[in-house]
Image (cartoon, rainbow, N blue to C red):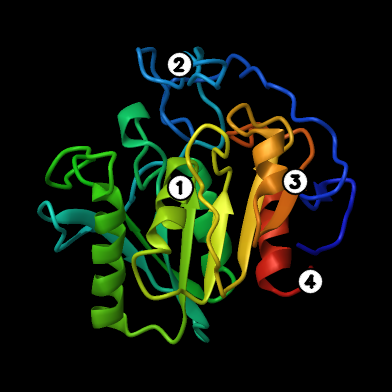
């Protein structure tokens, strides 16, 4: 792994500060980057638990789903998948398929961190296809958790290639969606680029695999779902550590946008 080091961005693999567990501040329950609710789900034996839904109201970064935009239905293995396709202004350099956070914790394609990634890509000539996994929103079927969501991603990629024939295919995902992207790499043709936002390494499986395209990981050093040991041992990626950011990048959205833009424009 290689890449520059700065006050806001340190590359995984060296001696970097131990990841600290971050506590969410009081903030609204309405459409957080991933909707969070109390429940029995979560990992065991010392792994991170999804926090209880925060309270209070009106953060400026919350988005309204698809204002003025009609969603698409694309064929999926468990029924139609609700999707939206945003075409970048010319010249279009690539098209990306983006995967949202965990369906069982309220994750949808309208997630705000995923929108941060999408808007950054669109501003840099990359069209974006977002979709809801099975059982989310208007997508048919129900949560699978053992490969079905990977099949949904493969169906979304097939639709994009058939309908838009992109010159380059990029894949991106946030949290659970990053895990789906990583798992999919063993089951379909290799994309030209992979962008993973806050992958929960140490809380979910990210097996080693040889990837022939660039894989960039953007993660906070206060991410409560990331393991320091797992991050350091992850081969074949370029890791970009955002100082002070937790799993939801609260207060760090501009830094996240800047780091993504620097990476995809070749500045790092």
Quarter of the image where one finds residue 70: bottom left
Q: Is residue 174 above or below residue 41?
A: below
Element carrying mark 3: strand
1 vs 4, front mark: 1
Q: Specify the quadrant that holds the N terminus.
A: bottom right
Pointer 1 with pointer 4, Cβ within 8 A: no
- Residue named by callout 3: 241
> Is 10 left, or right, of 137 in this rendering?
right
133 displayed left or right of 123? left
Q: Which residue is mark 4?
A: 267
Q: Which residue is mark 2?
A: 53
Q: Residue 218 or 150: which is nearer the viewer?
A: 150
Q: Say which element carries label 1.
A: helix
Q: Is residue 254 visible?
A: no
Q: Which residue is mark 1?
A: 179
Could you tell me which secondary element the residue under label 4 belongs to? loop
C-alpha distance separating marks 1 and 3: 18 Å
Question: Residue 120: percent from the left, percent from the top?
Answer: 58, 61
Give percent across and percent down for residue 95.
44, 74
Quadrant of the rendered image containing residue 229: top right
Identified at 85% across, 34% down, the residue is 17
Structural crowding at the residue carrying mark 2, measured as other residues with C-alpha within 10 Å and reported as few (<14), some (14–19) or many (≥20) = some
Q: Earlier in the sequence, mark 1 or mark 3?
A: 1
Mark toward the viewer: 1 or 3: 1
Sequence-wise, the earlier of marks 2 and 4 is: 2
Which structural element holds mark 2?
loop
**Foreground residue, 145 or 63?**
145
**Camera-nearest label, 2 or 3:** 3
């Amino acid at each position: 792994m290689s890449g520059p080091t700065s006050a806001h961005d340190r590359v995984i693999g060296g001696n970097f500060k131990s990841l600290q567990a971050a506590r969410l501040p009081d903030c609204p329950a309405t459409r957080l980057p991933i909707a969070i609710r109390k429940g029995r789900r979560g990992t065991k034996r010392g792994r991170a638990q999804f926090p209880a839904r925060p309270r209070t109201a009106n953060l400026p970064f919350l988005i309204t789903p698809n204002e003025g935009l009609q969603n698409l239905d694309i064929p999926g293995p468990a029924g139609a998948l609700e999707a939206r396709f945003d075409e970048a202004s010319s010249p279009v350099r690539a098209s990306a398929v983006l995967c949202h956070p965990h369906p069982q914790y309220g994750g949808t394609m309208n997630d705000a961190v995923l929108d941060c990634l999408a808007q950054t890509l669109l501003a840099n000539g990359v069209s974006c296809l977002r979709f809801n996994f099975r059982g989310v929103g208007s997508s048919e079927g129900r949560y699978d958790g053992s490969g079905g969501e990977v099949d949904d991603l493969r169906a979304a990629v097939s639709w994009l290639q058939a309908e838009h024939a992109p010159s380059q295919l990029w894949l991106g995902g946030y949290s659970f969606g990053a895990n789906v992207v990583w798992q999919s790499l063993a089951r379909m043709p290799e994309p030209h680029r992979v962008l993973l936002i806050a992958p929960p390494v140490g809380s979910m499986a990210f097996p080693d695999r040889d990837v022939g395209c660039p894989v960039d990981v953007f993660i906070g050093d206060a991410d409560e779902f990331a393991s320091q040991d797992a991050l350091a041992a992850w081969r074949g990626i370029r890791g970009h550590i955002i100082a002070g950011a937790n799993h939801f990048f609260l207060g760090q959205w501009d830094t996240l946008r800047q780091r993504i833009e620097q990476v995809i424009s070749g500045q790092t």
